[in-house]
Amino acid sequence: MSGDQAASLIAGIMCLVLVGSNLIVRRLALGQTIKLALVWAAIFAVILFGASLLQSNDEQQSTASPQLPHALQALHNVDYRVI
């Protein structure tokens, strides 16, 4: 397990402890507790999904070749070899 994976696992456990302790302290009925737990799980899932999209978008932009303006694209494609 790498350091990043361990940090991610610890952060996930901390989020679960935070939400779980909040639900325990409220002493709600079981049905309402499950409903709130699902809402919290959905919130964290959306946040993690958004973060992964941003990360993959950053990786794609860093590996993509820069786009040249139309006027410079023609110069870029010219073969300058001397025959």
Image (cartoon, rainbow, N blue to C red):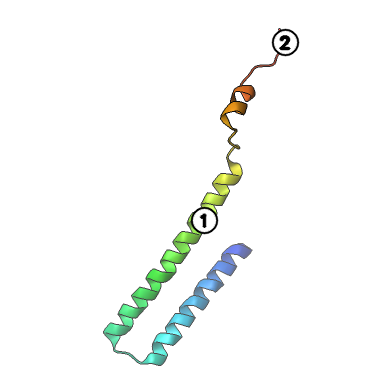
Q: Residue furthest top?
A: 83
Above or below, 30 relative to 68: below
Q: Which residue is mark 2?
A: 82
* Residue 70 relative to residue 16: left or right: right
Q: Residue 72 at what x, y percent from top left? A: 62, 27
Q: Secondary structure at mark 2?
A: loop
Estimate how packed mark 2 is, as few (under 14), some (14 to 19) or many (20 or more) residues with alpha carbons within 10 Å.
Answer: few
> Which residue appears at 39% of the width and 75% of the height?
40
Quadrant housing residue 34: bottom left
Above or below, 62 relative to 41: above
Q: Residue 82 at what x, y percent from top left? A: 72, 10
Dot placed on the residue nearer the N-terminal end, 2 or 1: 1
Q: Amino acid at mark 1?
A: Leu
Residue 54: mark in rendering = 1
> Which residue appears at 30% of the width and 78% of the height?
35
Q: Secondary structure at mark 1?
A: helix
* Residue 48 relative to residue 74: left or right: left
Q: Does residue 1 appear anywhere in the picture?
A: no
Query: Quadrant location of the C terminus?
Result: top right
